[in-house]
Amino acid sequence: MKAVTDKVFSCWINDVLRYNNSHFSQFNKVLIQDGSSFSVKKSLKNIWPGRFTKISPAAIELHATINLHNGSFEQATITPDTFSERAEMPAVDDLKGYFFLADRGYYSSNFILKLDEAGGYYVLRAKGLKRALVHQAVQGDGKRLVNKKRPQLSQLQTRLPKKQLVDIDIEINGELVRLIAVWSPKEKRHTYLITNLNRQEFSAVEVTHIYRMRWQVELLFN
């Protein structure tokens, strides 16, 4: 089954996502992390407790780490659904030279700063940044949205365009971090991708394309 699954992932990457190893040749590995819940028999609720006790009193969480370089599993674990997703992430020190891609459930300011310090790279969907100070914000057409005064991200949101990406520098725990604002028609609001990829090498558009690679792990759960 593992051999068949690896083959399927390889086909998805090459034929559907058009993934090219040369895009990420500077990274030792490109890892995608995610988790998904599955209900199991109710009588197992004491062994595999679920988060939603009325709907699914017994449930498991499948945590998967996929190596995008070769389209195979790097790691897969099963825990009770009540366990934290972050606890199943690779250790920061083990991600040196790697590129890490994950959804907002894995974001924390402490994690990204430690990962950057350890020599790892990332693109994650961010959350909880409304109070972060914005040092600069540049639209796709080059227009600057921030002058000398440094507004909080919540104050800038109403001025963010819907038809252009905005490349932003925000302050997190005293460090400047790159943030890409992307309008989501489905959610009818801006979402934010946080990264330490150099903007001289990876444009805002390229960062959004890279983040779409994360959907690879969602295909696993479907």
Image: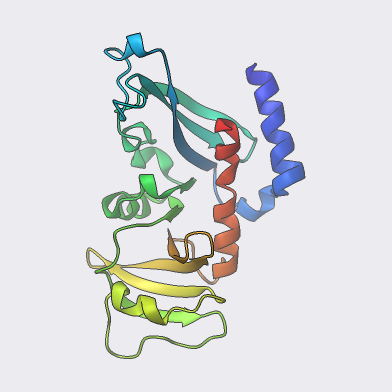
Up the image or down, 31 lies above or below 36; here it is below
Q: Do we see residue 203 in this rendering?
A: no
In the rendered image, residue 36, in percent from the top left (x then y), is placed at 45, 32
Image-based side of 76 in relation to 73, left or right:
left
Q: Do we see residue 169 in this rendering?
A: yes
Q: State the colouring used for the structure image.
A: rainbow
Image-based side of 67 in relation to 131, left or right:
right
Quadrant of the drawing holding the N terminus? top right
Task: Determine the residue positioned at 33% across, 71% down.
Answer: 170
| Count of numbered labels shown in the rendering | 0
Camera-side residue of 182 and 196: 182
Dividing the picture into quadrants, the one containing residue 28 is top right
Q: Residue furthest top?
A: 43
In the rendered image, residue 189, in percent from the top left (x then y), is placed at 44, 66
Q: Residue furthest bottom?
A: 148
In the rendered image, residue 100, in percent from the top left (x then y), is placed at 47, 46
Q: Residue furthest right?
A: 15
Dividing the picture into quadrants, the one containing residue 221 is top right
In the rendered image, residue 20, in percent from the top left (x then y), is placed at 70, 50
Task: Determine the residue positioned at 35% across, 19% down.
Answer: 58
Quadrant of the drawing holding the C terminus? top right
Camera-side residue of 102 and 177: 102
Task: Determine the residue positioned at 22% across, 63% down.
Answer: 173
Task: Determine the residue positioned at 55% across, 46% down.
Answer: 214
Up the image or down, 180 lies above or below 211; here it is below
